[in-house]
């Protein structure tokens, strides 16, 4: 099944005309926050928030620990965190999601794992907001402080 496909298994307009802007590769382990207007694909390990006005794709080898806000999200790998979609959340047969979701539409294929609470909304109440540089720096410093505090307590 193609990512974000229609009932007849043809790619939807959302993915057939746009290319992936950001890729976290299989051999990459990344931490921080991503704010983008483009499509994001995670094939490696990513720890942090992801916010985009388009799509997030977690490949079969991908692992995300953090929250996602996007138009569409496809999970073929693993994710621990909450998902908010203005359109479709798709969990493929190899996907695993531990976290709460707030979505307009959902597709969970046989074999997928979902553990959490779900809220279906017909109209997304909050528009996805991409942070400006100042807000990004504030979040970055917050996460660095939080990460340093965790290291001290371990």
Image (tube, rainbow, N blue to C red):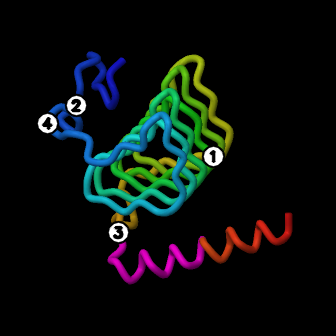
Sequence-wise first label, 4 or 2: 2
Instruction: State the residue at coordinates (71%, 72%).
Output: 148
Q: Gap between marks 3 and 2, in whole Å?
A: 24 Å
Single out the mark in the foreground, 1 or 2. 1
* Dot 1 crowding, Cα within 10 Å, few <14, some 14–19, many 20+: some
Q: Is residue 21 left or right of residue 60?
A: left
Q: CA distance from mark 3 to mark 4?
A: 23 Å
Does any portion of residue 153 appear in the rendered image? Answer: yes
**Considering depth in this image, is 83 or 136 the residue closer to the camera?**
136
Q: Position of residue 1 (x, y in %)?
A: 36, 17
Q: Nearer the viewer, residue 129 or 137?
A: 137
Query: Would you say the residues marked 1 and 4 are in contact, meaning their CB atoms lie under 8 Å apart?
Result: no
Say whether residue 105 is visible: no
Quarter of the image where one finds residue 6: top left
- The magenta segment: 130-143
Residue 133 drawn in magenta? yes
Give the residue at mark 2: 12
- Cα distance, mark 1 to mark 2? 26 Å
Label 1 SS: strand
> Which mark, by number, is residue 129?
3
Residue annotated with mark 4: 17
Label disc, if present, on residue 80 of the rendered structure: 1
Q: Element at badge 2?
A: loop
């Amino acid at each position: 099944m193609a990512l974000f496909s229609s009932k007849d298994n043809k790619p939807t307009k959302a993915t057939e005309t746009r290319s992936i802007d950001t890729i976290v590769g299989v051999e990459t382990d990344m931490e921080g926050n991503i704010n983008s207007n483009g499509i994001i694909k995670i094939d490696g390990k990513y720890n942090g928030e992801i916010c985009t006005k388009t799509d997030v794709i977690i490949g079969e080898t991908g692992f995300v620990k953090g929250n996602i806000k996007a138009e569409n999200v496809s999970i073929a790998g693993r994710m621990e965190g909450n998902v908010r979609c203005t359109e479709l959340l798709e969990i493929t047969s190899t996907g695993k999601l531990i976290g709460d979701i707030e979505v307009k539409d959902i597709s969970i294929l046989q074999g997928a794992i979902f553990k959490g609470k779900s809220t279906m909304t017909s109209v997304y109440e909050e528009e996805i907001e991409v942070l400006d540089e100042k807000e990004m720096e504030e979040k970055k410093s917050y996460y660095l402080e939080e990460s340093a505090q965790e290291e001290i307590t371990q």
